[in-house]
Each structure stands twice: as C-alpha cells, then as structure tokens.
C-alpha cells in the first residue's frame, strides 16, 4: 500500500524559507509523479508544481516560478518542496500528492489525477 | 489564471441527486479532457473521485459520475448519502498555467 508521509508543522518568519518533505513507502518511487498542492485556511486548493523523480526536472505553476523549488531524492524515496521569501499569505496546509503527468505541446507540463495524498503540513508565517 | 468557477453551495435530501458545475474556458476545461474532481471532508486531505472527465478510480462508488459539455464540466452525485456531505473541487489542465482548481462547492445533505 503506497503511503506519503510528510514532515511536521512549521512556524516561519516573513522573508525566510521553509522546506517540507514527503516520504513515500510502497511502490516504485522513481516512477511516481509527485505534486505539491496548498490550501490556505478556509480557502481552496492551489497547485504549486510537481516532479517525476526518475526524470529529475520539476514543473512549476507560473505563480510560484522563482520562489519554489521541488526536488526528489530517490535513495530515500523522499520529495521536497522549498518555498522562499515567505509572506503571511503563504500560511497554509501544504500537501504532497501522487498524480499522473499531463503531456502537452511542450512535453510534461503539469500533473493530474492525484490519487494518493500526504497528511498535510501546516506552515504558519508570522512575525 | 483565475480559478475555475463552481457554485459555492449545493444541497439535496438523502437519496436525491445533486450536480455541481465547473466552468472554465477553451484554454482549460473546454480544450482538454484532464478534468478531475476531489472530495474533501473537514480537516482531511482531498480524495480523488473522478479523473479524465468521467473515469472513476477503484473504490469510488458508481453514484459519482462526471461529464463535460463545452467549457463546463459537471459532477453528479446520485443517491445522496450523509457521508457525501463535504467540499468538492474540480481541477483542469490549463495552457501555460499547468493545473488549476475550481473555487470549491460545499455539498449539504439535508
């Protein structure tokens, strides 16, 4: 049974960075497509980007380009999401999720059909 | 890229059907069959209910069905049950923006 287990809650100062981990158990991690989705308190879902570890290259939503870095370590079956220049609006629950790649004109452009989710990591940005 | 438009709320009595719409443009919902639907109970992670417009993952009851017409996708829940009360989100591939989610719909079972 495939499971995704995320790191614990974080409290950060504005302007700092946060790195959240997502460890997979079961299945073949390298072939997964792992995405990161966030949800601000009382708000909807927002896709941030994703990666297929075996390829190593991440795809990011335009909104987060330059501020988010998604990586994966095949040796530990762990994906990471690092968000920099934090502001109060980044306060949210951050989820990792396994999905399927969407292949469009420019190759893999996004991910979809998230069938397995991590438990979520609350990140609070406050001075 | 704005979020896809969903009605804020929908409701129905047990046993009835409820349909939730998800409206986008020809650059997302209308142009591609990468539309998914998620159910989210309070304090829980979302759960995939429908993918690629109308496909149901293993384990999802056939009371849940998806469809699309033009720029609008729909999720229908037939035979409403108390446990169907939750928030529902659609998502779609969007050109140049990757994946976009809908604004969310709160379904209430009366």
Image (cartoon, coloured by chain):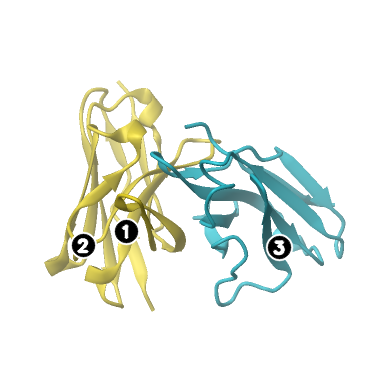
Identify the chain of the residue marked 1, using the numbered disc in the image.
A
Residue A31 coordinates in the image, percent (x, y): 26, 70
Q: Chain of mark 2?
A: A
Chain in cyan, by letter, is: B
The secondary element bearing badge 3 is classed as helix
Label 1 crowd bin: few (<14), some (14–19), many (20+), radius 10 Å: many
What subunit carries mark 3? B
Q: Report how many numbered discs are placed on residues in the image.
A: 3
Q: Quadrant of residue A102?
A: bottom left
* Residue closest to the far front: A105
Mark 1 touches mark 2? (CB < 8 Å): yes
Outermost residue toward the top in this view = A127
Label annotation for residue B83: 3
Residue A79: which disc? none
Residue B52 picture location, percent across and down: 54, 62
Cβ–Cβ under 8 Å for marks 3 and 1: no
Give the foreground label among 3 and 1: 1
Alpha-carbon span between mark 2 and mark 3: 36 Å
Distance CA(mark 1)–CA(mark 2): 8 Å
Q: Colour of chain A?
A: yellow
Q: Residue at x 43, y 42 (%)?
A: B95
The residue that disc 1 covers is: A34
Q: What is the CA distance from the residue labelled 3 to the residue labelled 1?
A: 28 Å
When the figure is inspected, residue B36 is found, relative to residue A66, above or below; the finding is below
């Amino acid at each position: 049974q495939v499971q995704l287990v995320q790191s614990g809650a974080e409290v950060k100062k504005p302007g700092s960075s946060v790195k959240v981990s997502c460890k997979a158990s079961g299945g073949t991690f390298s072939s997964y497509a792992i995405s990161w989705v966030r949800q601000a308190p009382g708000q909807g879902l927002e896709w941030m980007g994703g990666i297929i570890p075996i390829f190593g290259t991440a795809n990011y939503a335009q909104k987060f380009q330059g501020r988010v870095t998604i990586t994966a370590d095949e040796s530990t079956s762990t994906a990471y999401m690092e968000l920099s220049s934090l502001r109060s609006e980044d306060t949210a629950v951050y989820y990792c999720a396994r999905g399927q790649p969407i292949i469009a004109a420019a190759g893999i452009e996004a991910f979809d059909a998230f069938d397995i989710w991590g438990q979520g990591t609350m990140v609070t940005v406050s001075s | 890229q704005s979020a896809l438009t969903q009605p804020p709320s929908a409701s129905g009595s047990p046993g009835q059907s409820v349909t939730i719409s998800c409206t986008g443009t020809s650059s997302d919902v209308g142009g591609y069959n990468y539309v998914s639907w998620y159910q989210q109970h309070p304090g829980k992670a979302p759960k995939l209910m429908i993918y690629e417009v109308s496909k149901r993952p293993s384990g999802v009851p056939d009371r849940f069905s998806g469809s699309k017409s033009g720029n609008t996708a729909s999720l229908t829940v037939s035979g409403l049950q108390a446990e169907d009360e939750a928030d529902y989100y659609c998502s779609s591939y969007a050109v140049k923006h990757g994946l976009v989610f809908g604004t969310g719909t709160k379904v209430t079972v009366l």
